[in-house]
Amino acid sequence: MTWWRDAVLYHVYVRSFADADGDGVGDLPGVRARLDHLGALGVDAIWLSPTSVSPDADHGYDVSDYRHVQPALGGDAALDQLIAAAHARGLRVLLDLVPNHTSVEHPWFVDARGGRGSRHRDWYVWAHGRDGGPPNNWISDFRERGSPRSAWTLDPRSGEWCLTSFLPLQVDLNWRSPAVRAEFLDILAAWFRRGADGVRIDVAHKLVVDAGLRDNPPLAPGDDPVSRARGQRQVMNAERPELHDILRSWRRLADSLTPPRLLLGETYVGDVARLAPFHGADDELHLALNVPFLRSELTAPALRRVVDATLAALPAGAWPLWCASSHDDGRFPSRWCGGDERLVRCALLILLTLRGTPLLYYGDEIGMTDVEVAAGRRRDRAGGRDGCRTPMQWEPAPGGGFTRPGVEPWLPLGDCVRTNVRDQGRDPRSILTLCRDLIAERRRSEGLRRGGMAWLPSPEGVLAWRRGERHAVAVNLSAGAADVAGARGRVRVGTDRGRDGEEVGGTLRLPGQSGVLIELG
Ligand code: NOJ
């Protein structure tokens, strides 16, 4: 059973979704209290950002205990209650596994740092420096005040350098160690026993590094944008062939359970052709993050190129994942649409009708945009990601329905008067209603979930495609009106809701920045 192929997934950034205990930070009881919203939206599964115990240097992506839940989020009982409440509604729950690195506060690292003879020393990646500097030229994925930083941190006690691919407070595990592998298999099994329906795997592309710690080569002409942003080809500390063994072992575990569990990988690579290996022979990841799609432009040729490349690249048995916003890359209503509501509607129509599994980020369903966060309120030590992590905008009220009135949320609220769940939920023409209706269409039509996808001829600036036997989608991303020929049927859902139910007889006129989902026939 591959339920995720039929599903719409939804990423809850827990700290920012709903604050039940009034400390200004979202928590698991808060998510539980808002399950009605997710039920009404019609999503099938939520991915919770990391819930394990963490000193929060990177808001949960620096774990100090994988076996227990962060007390500030509600602790173990709160996670169990949330999973039970979600399951009671038929909503599945994915947990965020962070296997590439731990916090420096994890007892494994505290022990490892004790010296070369310590039991957990080889659970981390240590090396001698070179010419008075770090062991090689690898750079961290996080810049330091805008400049590249070495991926290595000197351990003054032993004089050795320790690999820290993100913050210096996040220490990379040594995935060549059989003990690390065994430990994580056990953690994963425990999470599945606890009720997790799957995991999102953080930094799945980086788990293993080159055994000889060789330098990364310099950029070459034509390198992808992710490599260009890093300033080097990450071939020695990412996408190593050895990591596939690990993914295969997790897949064996996931597949051995009833029902089978989902493995969704954060595969942060800049070229869709390089996603294919992460699926293996249908024995590794089920779904892989598609960064080139996420970072595409919202234009017809750019999207068509990346969708075609994705569908062509994925091996038999693999299935695409489409997402456009994330807690790392910003919200699509800002990045893709510049806040233009017509384009937000078009983007949602595209995300929810391409062949594959859509992954929404909390707030996408109301068109939430990135928020300008003043320097004094920033919380992201890696810099730059606070604006897309601000609290969910539930109500036009003090605290935004996120936290109690008078409590300062951990990040500032956006404009809750203009954009909020309560008002949009009551408005049949809102973005939220559009999103709900599109998800409902997917639910009622197998063709929209599983059917094939074929482009239809369309004028410049327009994307048009057929889904399954009974549906077509046409989206005009350009500013001027355009005519699309060939589709006959009835508009099921238009981004301009005034078009719902309209007969389409041959030629469809689409005003600029609008689109329709048509039932053919
Ligand atoms: C990817 C996560 O999405 C990001 O938020 C985090 O900072 C890094 N991995 C490091 O864990």
Image (tube, rainbow, N blue to C red):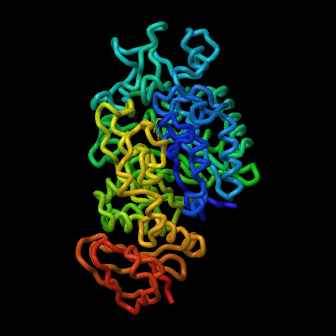
Q: Residue furthest left?
A: 480
Which residue corresponds to the image point at 66% horizontal and 26% vertical from the top-left? 179
Which residue corresponds to the image point at 50% horizontal and 40% vertical from the top-left? 15
Spot occupied by residue 78 in the image (x, y as percentages of width and height): 66, 39
* Residue 39 quadrant: bottom right
Q: Depth check: 87 or 158 in front?
A: 87
Residue 320 to residue 385: above or below: below
Q: Residue furthest bottom?
A: 505
Which residue corresponds to the image point at 32% horizontal and 40% vertical from the top-left? 373
112 relative to 401 in the view: left or right: right
Q: Depth check: 150 or 108 in front?
A: 108
Spot occupied by residue 59 in the image (x, y as percentages of width and height): 48, 33
User: In this orientation, does residue 293 appear?
Assistant: no
Q: How many marks?
A: 0
Spot occupied by residue 269 in the image (x, y as percentages of width and height): 42, 46
- Which corner quadrant holds the N terminus? bottom right
187 relative to 443 in the view: left or right: right
User: In this orientation, does residue 134 appear?
Assistant: yes
* Residue 345 quadrant: bottom left
Which residue corresponds to the image point at 40% horizontal and 38% vertical from the top-left? 411
Spot occupied by residue 16 in the image (x, y as percentages of width and height): 48, 43
